[in-house]
Amino acid sequence: MDTKKIAYLMLNEAGIGVVLVFLCLVFSVFVPKFATMNNISNIFTQISINTVIAVGMTFVILLGGIDLSVGSVLALCTILAGLTITKETLPLGAAIPLAVLASMAAGMACGLFNGWVCERWKIHSFVVTLGMLNMARGAVLQVSNSRTIYSFPKEFNAFGTLSYYGIPLIFIIAVLLVLIGHFILKKTVFGRMIYAIGNNEEAVRLSGHNTKIYKVTAFVICGATVGLAAILYMLRLNIASPILGNGFELSAIAAVVIGGTSMSGGKGSLIGTLIGAAIIGVLNNGLLLMGMSDFARQIVTGAIIVAAVIIDTYRARLSKMLS
Amino acid sequence: MMNAVNDANILSIKNVSKNFPGVCALSDVSLDIRKGEVHVLVGENGAGKSTLIKIICGFHPGDSGEVLLEGVHYAPETPRAAMDAGIRVVYQEFNLLSYLSVAENIFFDHLPRKGPLVDKKKLHDDTVKVLRRVGLDVDPWQPVELLGVAQMQLVEIAKAISSKCRVLILDEPTATLSPSEISRLFDIIRTEKQEGLTVIYISHHLNEIYDIGDRVTVLRNGEIVGTKSVKEIDIPQIVSMMVGRQMESEYPFMDEFKQTDIPILEVKRLRIAASPHEISFALKQGEILGIAGLVGSKRTETVRAIFGADARLGGEILLNGKMINILTPKDAVEHGICLLTEDRKSQGLILDMQLDCNISLASIDKVSKLGLIDYGEERRQAERFTASLAIKTPSVSQLVRNLSGGNQQKAVIAKWMFSDANVLIFDEPTRGIDVGAKYEIYLLMWDLLSRGKGILIVSSDLNELMGICHRIIVFSEGQVSGEVLRPEFEQERILRYAYRVS
């Protein structure tokens, strides 16, 4: 009976956790530099931004949607925040909060647009956000005159290097966001509706709920996490650029999918997403330390995504048999 | 008379058992299907009919026991293997590829080839031949999506008999057919039977057994209660075998309980997209009002428009004498009007969520505070309704998918009872539900009436409407063509209104 219970857990969220632990153990044994405080701290930093974006992406994917625009929207957010923070007329005390605000507002506005267009004209989000991917990229190149912004105030850059007991601040922010999101999904009416709509939107509508509001809100949440990710990006790399963020959407989707969230919606969790992002990060880091080339690492990451989805299909079947 | 060949068993099921987590779906079932007979399987939902069929069709293996196909051990591992062995099923829900042509659908598994290409000429001729067998006159190249339900079913049957078919299994084939279509289906079954086909026929319509069956087997709680020749048994006997007790009446109508004269819901000059006519009627407090009519008379469209599920083009809806503006289902629910849809699986329930989540779906505010769900309260409320509605489930954490049809319908009713709706609109409330559960659902309706609610029922089962309603209005081509009060209930009269013949 107990083995059954363990097997059941393994097949759900815990299973993906076991994969992560296993990867860490393998790398620790075969790569001497892997299990050092320094390197672990590095991994934390590397996965923070993807984790934050993947949180928003999880909300959207749980509803059976997708957001392909997060990469270019992130670039747009960094530029708007960068322009605000480097404006000389603003005192520093106001510039930093205003920059954060600008970034979040821009992200949320793009999310609102995505969600609203999808719901108003009943178009699949794949198409709408593909459009937004291009629009945001064009807009950011326009606004920035395709120039990169550096030279942020020292005080701002100082945040980026903060760490507590070797754990970088931006990773702490990412984990906090995961926990808040997890709480929302599991404990609130809003979260319940996200899962319910992802499973059967029509049944929810006919039970007297305005499903459109929930769906649009999920896109706005996704936009907000992109706005936050943009600030973390600036903290970490001290630049704002119109050309960054290419392919970020794919890493975020990969983290969500590896974390066990179903692409058709209704099933999944943010803890899974965090572990998914960590698996990608650990693999990238470990393989790099082993001396594997960029190209080879890309092949491995791609293969892992496909494997995760294959496992997912079996997981559903197996856990049904065990439950 | 049965000769020696007919007596031989084509399928012998020997001591087959099957357990699902927490449920014993089949226990020690033994059954012989004779070559060339039409064998009817009846039983309440959850009695094990589908499980048995799925074992025969290779969807899942039995836990123990054995099946012999013409005396040879037979244990298909996949549906494909069952098909290759000549066991074909036509399910209630069709498995047709709607954008492909009739011909391509029928011969999908074995398209005639000319080298690497499809031999269109042969495909066409073969299709015409098999369509003639099932008496369907359509162009082989017509896409399946343009066909009606009855025609699609014939295409399914054509597909089944187009290749080697020793046993044809029909799962509730008449659920969506009109009387004339049903009799044509029966003609086809009789003809194929002459040709030596064996048919296993599953149905909830007990009178059909006498039209088409040779023998009938009754299942209850995963066990076989008995197998009888149809000549030896009558409907009341079958029903009591199914439910395991004597049933006094199929419908509980409580004469002592009178409806009031106070209108609770008034529909005035309603206009819907599907009909050019205006629709008006009123439902009284404490009344069960039935809506009868032929398939396509716009009954479902009308109640969906009242509920706000589809757009309303014009007209007024009054609740307790006050005009209300219903634009979406949300408005309707807030006014205490609810709709139990025809298709409960895709529109009434979230199959992959737990029973308690489904029960609280329309009243989530009652089990939450400041946007936070109170799980304990949700569970308690769900348990309360599960008990009072006698929903059969191991716990309220069970996924609704795992409940039987009757219990799923009860879950939908629980959802609306929890939301304290005052007007309940049932669209085909007992379709696909077995006799015992039907009776319980009728009793629940009476319980609701005694609390001053009003009930509107759309049903294609005229006996059901005449059995439980105070009053029936008849729809014909998108308008109300007649009204009949209980003392005047008469099948012929209602049908005259439905067909608009005076």
Image (tube, helix red, strand yellow):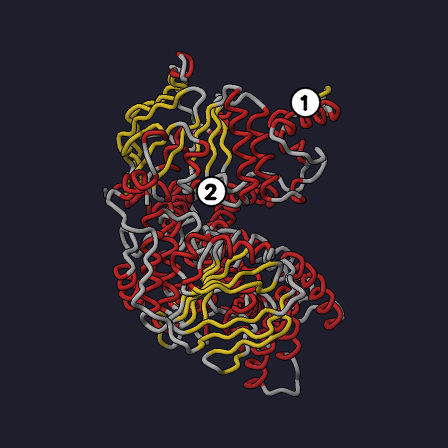
Q: Chain of mark 2?
A: A
- Name the mark on residue A313: 2
* Residue B129 screen position, x and y as percent: 66, 24
Q: Residue at x 47, y 53 (%)?
A: B491
* Residue A265 screen position, x and y as percent: 50, 55
**Is A191 left or right of B28, judged from the image as shown?**
right
Image vertical order of residue A216 relative to residue A305, above or below: below
Q: Residue B72 versus residue B155: which sits nearer the camera? A: B155
Q: Residue A196 versus residue B448: which sits nearer the camera? A: B448
Looking at the image, which residue sits at the far top? B4
* Mark 1 element type: loop
Whether residue A51 is visible, yes or no, is: no
Amino acid type of the residue tagged 1 in the rendering = Pro
Determine which residue is flagged by label 1. B112
Q: Residue at x 69, y 68 (%)?
A: A148
Mark 1 crowdedness (10 Å alpha carbons): few <14, some 14-19, many ≥20 = some
Quarter holding the C terminus of chain B is bottom right
Q: Residue B292 versus residue B398: which sits nearer the camera? A: B292
**Is A300 left or right of B276, judged from the image as shown?**
left
Q: Chain of mark 1?
A: B
* Residue B340 screen position, x and y as percent: 45, 61
Whether residue B158 is visible, yes or no, is: yes
* Residue A23 screen position, x and y as percent: 42, 44
Q: Residue A238 versus residue B435: which sits nearer the camera? A: B435
* Mark 2 element type: helix
Mark 2 crowdedness (10 Å alpha carbons): few <14, some 14-19, many ≥20 = few
Point out the frontmost of discs 1 and 2: 1
Image vertical order of residue B423 relative to residue A65, above or below: below
Quarter holding the N terminus of chain B is top left
- Name the mark on residue B345: none
